[in-house]
Image: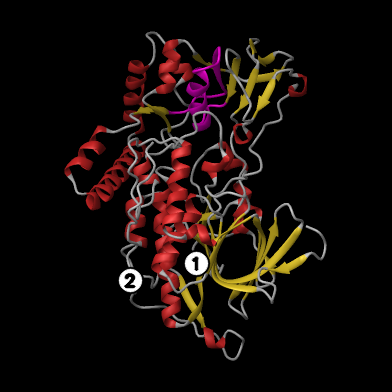
Amino acid sequence: MTDGAVSTLRGHGPEHLDVAVVGAGLSGVGAGCYLRKKVPWASFAVFEARQAMGGTWDLFRYPGIRSDSDMFTLGYSFRPWDGEKAIADGASILRYIQETASAYGVDERIRYGHRIVRADWSDAESRWHVTAERVGEGTAVEFTCGFLFACAGYYRYDHGYLPAFAGIEDYRGTVVHPQAWPEDLDVTDKRVVVVGSGATAITLVPALAERAGHVVMLQRSPSYVGAAPARNPVDDILRKVLPGRLSGPVIRWMHALFLQGFYRVSRRHPGLVKRLYRARLRRELPPGYDIGTHFTPRYDPWDQRFCLAPDGDLFAAIRRGSASVVTDRIARFTTSGILLESGTELEADVVVTATGLELQFLGGAELWVAGRPLDVAGKLTYKGMMLQDVPNFALAVGYTNASWTLKVDLTCDYVCRILDRMHRRGWGKVTPVADGAASTGEPLMGLDAGYIRRAAHLLPRQGATFPWRVHQSFLRDYRAMKLSGLEGDGLVFSHQRARAAGSGPDDAARPTAPEAGPPLEPVAVPASKA
């Protein structure tokens, strides 16, 4: 930003908003819908650094991009997905987000090209002072808000993670990262190597194999990959026999409970799940295929996220011979491909580095509380959605063992309950207070994936007990965030608005019974068919 080039959003002093939402992706649009319907008195805006809504589903344009969870749980609870496929392509998901934003009027509240770079909490005023950069202009704007809601996800949008591969500068072919896929890249009849074994690689390989001469998935170690129908016949039956107002919630709960059950069985009986997994692989892969080398991970199920192959498309590509898997380590790049530690050289016209994400917190913005920079990694998370001792702040982080939106929906509803309580009682401040809860040292995400380990110093921590521990359980969170009151559990409400300017001591209190806000009614706008 240009020195001194700071203005206000409205030109007559800093604009004040009741709520500032950071990010206009799946979470930010959902947050806007909840704010519109459950706290209609609240002024809010959604700040988006890019020039389009949709987040992940607008940014990622690589072949085959699709959901890694079923859309009945990845979609919003207040606007059930009615596409034909449970596993939807990226374009359909983007349309669903855009149509939802339009249906609830959230599209009118989005301010594009505004990257939040710093937020300072003032105890004296009970509000955040926020600085946003106008992307591409070199200027900044300032505003204040009563509540800051971070819905920007947890990874960097400007680039992904790329290891320092030896000799990559010598390679004469094309190297591309999925996060920056070129529109004009043509892989027809070419030799392609996809480096990686995560969800992105599992998606890319069968999609590229439709046109490429041959695709190799080069992995250092295997991941769990399960085949699932892209269209579930049970969903179709329920839609036929149940009225529309019931089919959406019933299907959503059915999928959510199945995911929860599968996760619990996997954690409690990993040996059983491994045996069932290998039995399924023997049916999906050619006879005699080396499952032990290429599809047997060294970790237990759900130590890392399970990858999904809709209709078994990855295994089908392997059976056809248009794709193959190589499990080895990269020694270096050569002029014509990749030399492996085993001595084998993979020749390639195109190398796709599906090597993962680079994480960051709050889109890279700085947080200051009472004049001091916030050490996010030193804070515990309250119910996986607020930070210890940080007032009037929430973050939307989904599940790692189920659909992202299951948790984000609960978080948005909980934030609205908090806001409504504060509005009704005249409170200006809400703070999660840990009361001596000890940190376990575990990051918020609760996975052993490489991208989590690399960013452990950037992420908040978990405590030993609830509500400071993240259970990755939709059922437990539903009880704790949807069916329970706001009192107790560490939330402290304070600062009567009349005293926000410092006219008297803090009036700290804990609320008693929750007031229920109006229900978030579904809008009858059909989702795009997947």
Task: Indicate the colouring scheme.
Answer: secondary structure
Q: Secondary structure at mark 2?
A: loop
Amino acid carrying label 1: it is Ala
The residue at 77%/19% (across/down) is: 170
Asked if residue 468 can be seen in this view, the reply is no
The number of callouts visible is 2
Comparing 128 with 184, the one in front is: 184
Q: Residue 529, relative to residue 311: is it above or below?
A: below
Q: What mark, if any, has residue 434 been given in the picture?
A: 1
Rendered location of residue 152, percent (x, y): 56, 53
In the visual, does 244 lie left or right of 340?
left
Rendered location of residue 320, percent (x, y): 43, 11
The residue at 43%/65% (across/down) is: 36
Rendered location of residue 31, percent (x, y): 46, 59
Quadrant placement of the C terminus: top left
In the visual, does 126 lie left or right of 295?
right
Query: What stretch of residues is rendered in magenta?
Result: 196-224
Q: Is residue 216 magenta?
A: yes
Amino acid carrying label 2: it is Ala
Quadrant placement of the N terminus: bottom right
Report the residue marked by disc 2: 516
Q: CA distance from mark 1 to mark 2?
A: 26 Å
Q: Which residue reaches farthest right?
A: 3
Q: Secondary structure at mark 1?
A: loop
Q: Is residue 518 magenta?
A: no
